[in-house]
Image (cartoon, rainbow, N blue to C red):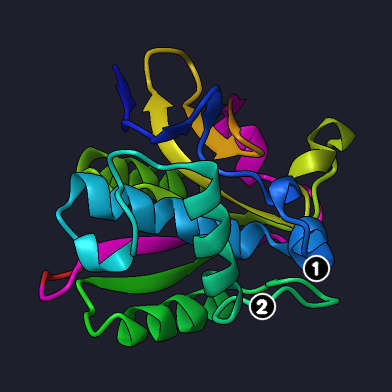
Amino acid sequence: MKTELDHFRIGPYIGGDQEWFTDSWMKIGGCGAVTACDLCIYLAKHKGMRALYPFDPDEVTMEDYLAFGMRMRAFLTPRATGINRTSIFVDGLNAYLASCGVRPIRLQGVSGEETVQSAEQQIRGRIDRGFPVPYLMLMHRDRKLKDFMWHWFLLNGYDASGDALRVRAVSYGEQTWMDFPHLWQTGRRPKGGFVRIEPAGTQTD
């Protein structure tokens, strides 16, 4: 069984890329803000939450995306230690939602110490409900994943047809399929975690 959420494109790119920004801090450490931007554009386009994106979510341009990223920067400001806790992301995105005059979603951080079975169940549950998952990976024993270390990105698809769950990560303007148990069981600390998204007013399962 394979489930993939539709992600917006900017020309040949899938979603945004922090390296597009001329602001040096956004270029180096803007992954949290970029992940929030991609999430808000998705919610505006596919969940009717138009207040979350000040431009046209059906035709995302590079100019509009960069302007939106610099607005989001004020709420998820890059810093020397990075946005290295899910609570920082949740607080920043909640502040952005409040600035839009709406709070259509509820956010909950999930620790990287959860079991892989619990993490898989929660991530599949979010994607099955049509919600991408903001994911934070800090340290990992596998140096092949170095571009995703100390980094925020979105999970917006999964493939459960094989022996191990595979997930689709969107970052740097492209998609990457990963073995989820390997991604989650980092073998290093600190680990990171992810953010559960629920429509406001729903009961958490």
Disc 1 element: helix
Percent from the top left, x then y, of residue 97?
33, 78
Asked whether the residues under the numbered discs 1 and 2 touch, taking CB atoms below 8 Å apart as contact, a structural biologist would say yes
Crowdedness of circle 1 by 10 Å Cα count: few (<14), some, many (20+)? some
- In percent of width and height, residue 51 lies at 24, 68
Quarter of the image where one finds residue 8 = top left
Which percent across, then down, holds residue 104? 19, 72
- Residue 64 magenta-highlighted: no
The answer to whether residue 189 is magenta is: yes
Q: Which residues are magenta?
A: 176-201
Q: Is residue 164 left or right of residue 22?
A: left
The residue positioned 24% from the left and 46% from the top of the image is 45
Query: Considering the numbered disc 2 on the image, is that residue within a helix, a strand or a loop?
Result: loop
- Residue receiving disc 1: 25
Residue 116 horizontal side relative to residue 58, left or right: right
Residue occupying image coordinates x 37% and y 13%? 161
